[in-house]
Structures are given as structure tokens and as C-alpha cells.
Image (spheres, coloured by chain):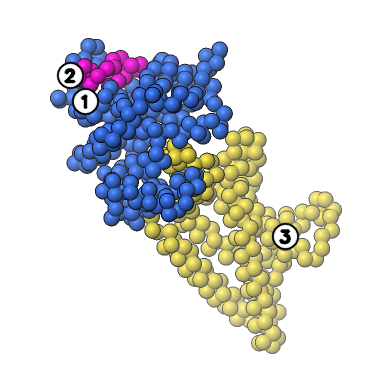
Amino acid sequence: MKYLEIKNLRKSFGGLTVIKDISLTVEEGEVVAIIGPSGSGKSTLLRCATMLETMDSGELIYLGEHAVKTNAEGKAVYAPPKQLKKIQRYYSLVFQDFNLFPHFTVLKNVTDALITIQKMSKAEALAIGRELLQKMSLSDKEDAYPYQLSGGQQQRVSIARALALSPKVLFFDEPTSALDPELTGEILKVIRDLAAEQMTMVIVTHEMSFARDVADYIIFMDGGVIVEEGLPEQVINNPQNERTRAFLSRFER
Amino acid sequence: MDWSVMLLKLAEGMLKSVEIFTLTLLLSLPLGLFVAFGRMSKNILIRNIIKFYISIMRGTPLMLQLMVVYFGPYYIFGLTLPRGYRFWAVIIGFVLNYAAYFAEIYRAGIESMPLGQYEAAKVLGYNQSQTFMRIILPQVIKRILPPVTNEVITLIKDTSLAFAIGEFEMFTTARAIASAESTVTPYIAAGIFYYVFNYIVAGAMEWCEKKMSYFR
Ligand SMILES: Nc1ncnc2c1ncn2[C@@H]1O[C@H](COP(=O)(O)OP(=O)(O)OP(=O)(O)O)[C@@H](O)[C@H]1O
Ligand SMILES: [Mg+2]
């Protein structure tokens, strides 16, 4: 089943067009990695997909349900709020700089949305939260506050927080870029484990070898368009496009 | 004047000062939040009206504002107000003035919040009011506690400005007794009172700041 479809997405800020006609599909259980130089529009693409940014035109579809359509004049039309609320529960986003809630404990960060928004019983939410923290090897930190954790631990909390709502699609925007190099490994491992569990994920990353290993499909973006896409071996090991080659040559294999 | 009478009068004055202080805070702290919302409103008319109101409150002496609130209804509109109005004029004047100052503190606090907090809340499905009440406000309160403490301490001393319209709070009472009896004792009593009051309030605010220090 197609979990996510983006069709002909366009987005500009003021006069600057940042995304020029991007289409992509993510199948259930698939892991898609998006790579590309700084300023190529990767974050903007994720932010449009997660509705943090309003798209100018195009279609956004989760599990066959339209969040955004385009009308005859070529303008994006968003579904009614109730529908959007429902679709919003299909996905979650892990931020580069975690954005944990500093005044909540680790466990509350993970469970608050379940209790406050989904009106789940406290006991049930805590059980889910503890299970996720255990999965993230953070059981001993449930009563800690974010400032007491390392960057890698904070990022794992934020992944647990995103998973608590059992999203169908999980987006990551450079989940290791804010971390010291020695801490990136623990996050990449968590994402690998999720991939092994068939979690559907869209990951913006600068970790090329990680992208090649974990992704089923790679998208290379530059200047707001998809320049090259395909299987990892193909795009990373044997790029066809000159710009892809130039970009990849900057990373050691 | 009898010592006991003098003390009684001073005690009444103290009580009045505490009353002005408490009522002003109770009303201006929440009112300031609404003023802050108005100041940040998307509606340009509301925003500019509030901006003007705040600039008046900050740009003119509080003593003058009290006089306008007290004498204004009579001199401008010819209204005669009941005798008890004097006290309420003090309260209205203080509340309007302090709400403006608190509003600016709230606004600075709210605007200093990183966008990422709103975005994380949005992605997790919090609606606007849940985001504000659960995520933003607790963090804002922690951030604004020091400047709010400053204002609260200033308010204690400002209550003495009520003398401008003859409300018998601590300072006015002390002055009246001092000039009638030719003694400075009431002034000393007033000084001690303000100092102790300050000391207690500062302690309370410090306790609040400690209470909020569990996160960063
Ligand atoms: N809110 C905004 N207002 C104006 N311009 C923006 C905004 N957000 C992004 N841009 C511009 O859009 C372009 C694409 O930005 P984006 O953050 O999507 O790139 P990116 O591929 O994620 O880069 P990086 O690898 O550095 O994170 C950049 O030129 C950026 O300056
Ligand atoms: Mg980015």
C-alpha cells in the first residue's frame, strides 16, 4: 500500500522557489533516504509533507487520503480541519535539534500527547512510554529532565516520543547533525532497528554509508528538484547524473 | 495623639497598602496576559490600540495616571462618584499601569520561545490552546519570573503614590500623623514596614524561582 504520495509539490518563500515540482511515493515498510547539498530544499520538503509549511501547489496523500489537493487554478487546497487532524496522526517527525519539552520528564515527554490528546488512560500511556524507553535503552532515565541527558539520549527520547503515537510514516530531518560524532552511531542503530521492524521512514541525512545501508530507495535533491533517484547501489555506487557524482565525491566511501 | 491611636492608624494604613498591593497583582497579572495577546494580535487595529495604551502607561507618570482616573470622571464628564471611589481609582490606576508592564514582560517571554517547541507540539497533534497552556506557558513563566519579581518589588513602593489622591495607605497615614504630631516616628515605622514587606515578597518570589528550577 502507498503510505505517502506527494505529487507535483511546489513551494516558494516570497519570490524564492525552493521546491520545484517534486513527486515521490513511499510504500508501506519502505525506507527512503533523501540526500543533497545544503539549501537544496530537503527540510522544506519534509516540512511540507508534515504540514509545518503550507505548500503552494501539489497533492499530499497519506494512505490514500488527501490532505492537499490542487484546484483548477493550480492552488493547493487543504482538507477540512477534521480530516487534517486525522491524517496528521499518520505521521510524525524527528527534528534535528530534538525539540523536547524541557519542563517534562523523559517519560512525560513520551506520554503526554497520548494522555492529553488521545485521551488514553494514564496507566496505558505509561506502559507504552516505558516500553518505548526500554527499547531506546533509556529505562533508567524516565524521571530525568532533558537537560540532564546527552544529545544522543535526547534524540532517542524524541524518537520514542514520535513512536508513542504509532505513526505509519516517520520522518527524520538530519537526526544526527546536532550530535557529536561519537554519538551518531547510537541514533543510526535505533533507526536501523526500526527499519528491521518494517517501520516506514523518510530520512534526510548526510550520512552516505548509512543511507546506502538502511534505505530501500534514495532520492538525490539539488536546487529544489529530484536530480536522481533509485536503489542505493545505483544512486550511491553508480550515479548517472553529473551533479550527483559531484555531490557524492565530497564524501569518502 | 495617643500611642495606641497612632499605632492603630498606622496599622490601618499598612493594611490598606497590602490591600492595594494584593488587589493590583491579582488583577493585573492575568489582565497583562490578555493585553499581551492583544499586543501580538494579527488584527492590526487591536495591535495598534494596545500598543498606544502601553506607550501611554509607560510614558507618563503613574501619579498623573492615578489623578486622571480619580479626577477625570468629574472634570471631564461631570460625573459625581461615590465616596468609596477613591480606593477604586487607586486600584484601577495601578491595575491599568501594571498590566501594561506585565504585558510587555509576557510578550518578551512568549516571543523568546523557540519555534521548535511550537512545531514539535503541532506535529504531535496538540491544538493551539493545548500548546500554549501545556508547552509554552510553563516555560514562559520560568523565563519571566526575574523581571516580574522586579515589577512586584517596585509595586510595593509604588503603593505609596496613592497619597497623590489622598488615599490613606501607609505612606499617606504616616505623613498625616507626622505633620500633626511633629514627630518622625511614623516615617520610621513606615520605612520599617516597607522594608519588611519587601523582604517577605522577595523571599516569596525567590521561592517561586527555586520551584521552577527543576528544568532548564
Ligand atoms: N522560512 C523560510 N523563509 C525563507 N526562505 C526559506 C525558509 N525556509 C527555507 N528557506 C530557503 O529555502 C532553501 C531550502 O532550504 P532547506 O532548509 O529546505 O534546505 P536543506 O536542503 O534542508 O538544507 P540543509 O542541508 O542545510 O538543511 C534555502 O535557500 C533556504 O534559505
Ligand atoms: Mg535541512
Q: Is residue A228 magenta?
A: yes
What segment is highlighted magenta in the picture? A218-235
Of all chains, the one bearing label 2 is A
CB under 8 Å between callouts 2 and 1? yes
Callout 2 secondary element:
helix
Q: Amino acid at mark 2?
A: Asn
The residue singled out by tag 1 in the image is A212
The structure residue drawn at horizontal position 43% and vertical position 59%, both measured from the top left corner, is B212
Residue A166 seen in the figure: yes
Eye-nearest disc, 2 or 3: 2
The residue singled out by tag 2 in the image is A237
Where residue A232 sits in the image (x, y, percent)?
23, 21
Callout 1 secondary element:
helix
Callout 3 secondary element:
helix
Chain A colour as displayed: blue
Q: Which label belongs to residue B89?
A: 3
- Residue A31 placement: quadrant: top left
Where residue A110 sits in the image (x, y, percent)?
38, 47
The structure residue drawn at horizontal position 60% and vertical position 81%, both measured from the top left corner, is B185
